[in-house]
Image (tube, coloured by chain):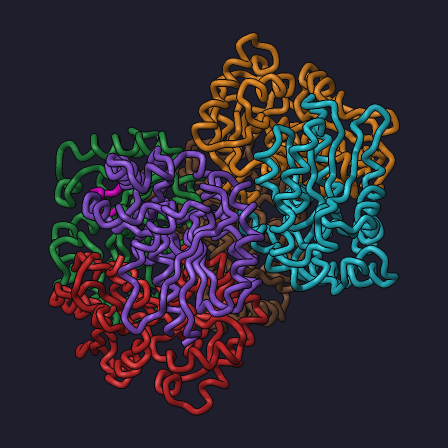
Chain colours: A purple, B red, C green, D brown, E orange, F cyan
Amino acid sequence: MTGRGPILVINPNSNAAVTAGLDAALEGLRFEGGPAIDCETLAEGPYGIESQRDADAVVPHLVRRVAERPDAAAVVIACYSDPGLHACREATRAPVFGIQEAGVTTALARGDRFGVIAVAEASIPRHLRALQRMGVLERLAGERAAGLTVAESAESPDALDRLRAAGEKLRGDGADVVILGCAGMARWRGALERALGLPVVDPTQAAVAMALGAVRG
Amino acid sequence: MTGRGPILVINPNSNAAVTAGLDAALEGLRFEGGPAIDCETLAEGPYGIESQRDADAVVPHLVRRVAERPDAAAVVIACYSDPGLHACREATRAPVFGIQEAGVTTALARGDRFGVIAVAEASIPRHLRALQRMGVLERLAGERAAGLTVAESAESPDALDRLRAAGEKLRGDGADVVILGCAGMARWRGALERALGLPVVDPTQAAVAMALGAVRG
Amino acid sequence: MTGRGPILVINPNSNAAVTAGLDAALEGLRFEGGPAIDCETLAEGPYGIESQRDADAVVPHLVRRVAERPDAAAVVIACYSDPGLHACREATRAPVFGIQEAGVTTALARGDRFGVIAVAEASIPRHLRALQRMGVLERLAGERAAGLTVAESAESPDALDRLRAAGEKLRGDGADVVILGCAGMARWRGALERALGLPVVDPTQAAVAMALGAVRG
Amino acid sequence: MTGRGPILVINPNSNAAVTAGLDAALEGLRFEGGPAIDCETLAEGPYGIESQRDADAVVPHLVRRVAERPDAAAVVIACYSDPGLHACREATRAPVFGIQEAGVTTALARGDRFGVIAVAEASIPRHLRALQRMGVLERLAGERAAGLTVAESAESPDALDRLRAAGEKLRGDGADVVILGCAGMARWRGALERALGLPVVDPTQAAVAMALGAVRG
Amino acid sequence: MTGRGPILVINPNSNAAVTAGLDAALEGLRFEGGPAIDCETLAEGPYGIESQRDADAVVPHLVRRVAERPDAAAVVIACYSDPGLHACREATRAPVFGIQEAGVTTALARGDRFGVIAVAEASIPRHLRALQRMGVLERLAGERAAGLTVAESAESPDALDRLRAAGEKLRGDGADVVILGCAGMARWRGALERALGLPVVDPTQAAVAMALGAVRG
Amino acid sequence: MTGRGPILVINPNSNAAVTAGLDAALEGLRFEGGPAIDCETLAEGPYGIESQRDADAVVPHLVRRVAERPDAAAVVIACYSDPGLHACREATRAPVFGIQEAGVTTALARGDRFGVIAVAEASIPRHLRALQRMGVLERLAGERAAGLTVAESAESPDALDRLRAAGEKLRGDGADVVILGCAGMARWRGALERALGLPVVDPTQAAVAMALGAVRG
């Protein structure tokens, strides 16, 4: 086993409600005798990460935070833009996972062609750049926006309907597995999976599961 | 959560020692309160899967076995050739993971370019076909054979030396993460990781970790 | 010349009417002084191959049959899913062709971007996996289903109309050459080619033509 | 059947000895009752095509010649640079095959990764451009030069040794099928195939076999 | 600096009005003390290049013209089909730019996904072949025809409206940068850029700017 | 023309000697009547950018600086890691060029397969990530390290010898055009081009030439 410390999940925005949502979504991966899963909020982050500029601005703070936690057995950066992933890897010997990478690669092991539900249109070009960097565009069926704010994605009563509508479009695009393209939508994962009849991947859960495998291998 | 049954790990060859090795390698992913991880041997399988013909011949037996276990919350096919992956997905509603797919996709989330250690040269073309099907060849740094039999890979005193030699060649090829390209080499994972100073992924552990994420999401 | 035996065309389903259709479609490639073209039905096959499970289940029978025919100068597996292609190559020194591979590669030599007409929607994901494995997705304009059963594809009076409708959609997708994505549609090839004004490739004819080239080179 | 005329094979260089060699290499594909295979020399061509400039210069002459032969049921441009392939397709309704495209696509249906033997180093960049245009670079194991002049490739007593040496290097590169990367090397195909124990594709034979399939489908 | 001669811009069609348009479009890149930019008409060219045949037919004349101008510090072939690009490179030591290559590669440095406006539908397959040869199809958002003749593209009062309509479709395809896919549309570049609110690249200007960089580096 | 202001070239490290070198290297692109080319040092940058962490840390400062200069007609980020490229594009309406993107895309228009000379081995993985994100890995012949510090790359008497040695290796890898993979090596461009007999691209010059084209189109 790689280490005995906790899996550290850092929410790089400063919205503690998002962190609380992450914390709840990871409850199923906490086990008696298993590693602790510590979720924390990056105090220096913006309230939401909505641009490349926002994503890049948190990197020095993330790097510092990762360096301050040598006790962590693994680190998960819980923002779908994967800010600072490579810089944080330079700052620790522990495995560092970005949730976009973990969500997408997990989806590659669940089906033939994946679809992504973005919170909003504006995120799609940023996500496509990341998919191109990962070299997996050939497996992408499509990315569709749910037309939600980050706040709505966690709480709005019609969020599930909008996610389902986006998921149905992705099915029409040829997707046989769907990724929730934001850290804050885990609470809808199970219901959306049942509604669509397709596997739905929450990227933070996917990243923490990979971290468990790395830590307990 | 998707289901409450066990994670079923099927070794498609009939060598019970390999199954016992898998069972031991997965100990770290068994938790109080977590899903059971059942490892079983496919009685109808060959003693070892050493050709495409061997891999294809086990598929009807795997499909039948998967269909017989509707209680399984997730299924892992524990042979690096991923025999019957898509056929088994047609036979159950539970998630089905192939260890090659899980190992490779996990490696994609650990580094930039992955290397694979094959037990023997003869497996490499079969693996490359799979990587091409997955659409991830652009991320492959190389695949190198350790020059071991499957039996030696589990027990030979010089197995670690040979794995290390193959791993060093992969580093020279540009790999920053290494995959053990066989179900039976997990016992060397930690030592090889320390020897190389690179992340080393055991594909069965990777698949079971993904299964945990799917089952407990 | 590689060999003097027949070109063996195996229909891996057990529907003798399909075999008879193949036999008729290959009449133009039988020549005085040329190799015999033997079409046979795989008795152990299902009545139709409609899933990955069906495709995988025939492989051991195909391999055995190929091994029983060392007299064959070349072998053609006449099912568009290319079942057992690599396993059969291990079982004989003769060239073995899958009709999907032969149809697609022939289309690559006839135009810039190819389209595929599938009998039914359900086959498309299986075909896309094969195209990805072949590394030729960049040349795919699209795949469209004609909405026929295998039986209808051979006999239905409106089959040609449906094929033409699918072909016109493929032209709209940018295809300048069209592949019939099933072993049983050869009788419509010429008429469809005239109706569309685009080259139409029958994959079994394409495979037997390649086999002729291999045998008589 | 698409047409009843001959398969017209045009050697775009003016070296009649090359044409005679092509003619002999195609003997195995001439059948009683089958299409005639007419080989002709392009009088306006250079003595050998050794540069992009040479290849481009023959195009207007090829186009004119193709337009003068509306009786041809299919056309094969018998130079591995595929000069004028797309322009000739605009000049006739008959199928037009370039031997590089036909050789490469046939090789894709014979193995997993192909190797190419070039006559000389200087041809390799031109060939790589064509492979990139075809979108098949992912399947290329390598291209190696035999170090022959075109004249030597047809006649030199040590040509087979040099081809074998290049073929062995390609096997080391991972090739499981080898293409003769020039119109003039067909006479060595069988001997090289036996020497290497790998399938060897002569591109002109491959193109004429495809033409047969197109004409007699 | 590579050379002190002019940048030679050759219009490979014989329409002097097109050359005059190019000349005007390049005014902004002529500087006191900078290289001369000589635009000339290829007398032997067709009035317009509208087919692969037309494109190929000008190559010998282009090669001769390039060879006659060893004084040129750089050469630009000002037709979006890039006729003779590689052949001309064999004929001079000066850098030779094709405007399609220059326009596309410049667009790759301006945005994530590029769109191309073709004058007419018939050019699109030819352009896609070129993009495939360049290995950049993954970055293509789409290509759309403006439905103009070459003459209209330079002069028609509603040309801008049609270009804008095509550009809006490309935005819908995901393009964040647009290329004018013809040598004759430079006069609309600025207005179209303002109308769309996206960067618009004129390929001849892009090629001459690259030539400036090569000559003055 | 897009704007009348200067082309702003920002050196994101705080080493003023590097900025002075850039300034000198761009002399050939300053023209009477042309745009000013202002080179400035980012005071908040590290002395050298030698890691992903360094690259990411300068982004907020770069974004601020770009926002402070709305007068700039175009912006060039003069570090081969292209730090902050997409974030800076959000901060201004002017075109923003990264020198890696500009150098690589310019090289794509100069030859078939490009090679990159890195200052040191440690930069290569970072560069490969960028090439993968750009979707151009298929055109990469190789990247080789010169084994220089950034300081040596500008001043060491044996720098040219080391660059030449790396360039010769790249030629062996199949490169027909070479990129200097650092902002500080422009002074060697001409001499290296003459020594290798291959085009050599300085990325800062390439970016400024593209900026000229954008500003003066």
Front in this rendered view, residue E181 or D1 = E181
> x%, y% of residue F182?
72, 52
Q: Quadrant of the C terminus of chain A?
A: bottom left
Q: Is E10 rendered above or below residue D213?
A: above
Q: Does the magenta run of residues contain C120?
A: yes
Residue at the (86%, 26%) spot, across then down: F32
Residue at the (33%, 40%) spot, across then down: A153
> x%, y% of residue C8?
26, 61
Q: Quadrant of the N terminus of chain A?
A: bottom left
Q: For residue C191, which quarter of the picture?
A: top left
Q: Is C145 rendered above or below residue C95?
A: above
Q: Is A112 rendered above or below residue E115?
A: below
Q: Is residue D98 left or right of residue C132?
A: right
> x%, y% of residue F180?
73, 52
In the picture as drawn, the residue positioned furthest to the top comes out as: E157
For the question of whether residue C143 can be seen, the reply is no
In the picture as drawn, the residue positioned furthest to the bottom comes out as: B157
Q: Is C166 rendered above or below residue B194?
A: above
Q: Does the magenta run of residues contain A189?
A: no
Q: Specify start and end residues of the magenta stretch as a single range.
A: C117-123
Front in this rendered view, residue A122 or E61 = A122
Q: Is residue C211 left or right of residue F6?
A: left
Q: Is residue F138 left or right of residue B40?
A: right
Q: Is residue D53 left or right of residue B147?
A: right
Front in this rendered view, residue D29 or F111 = F111
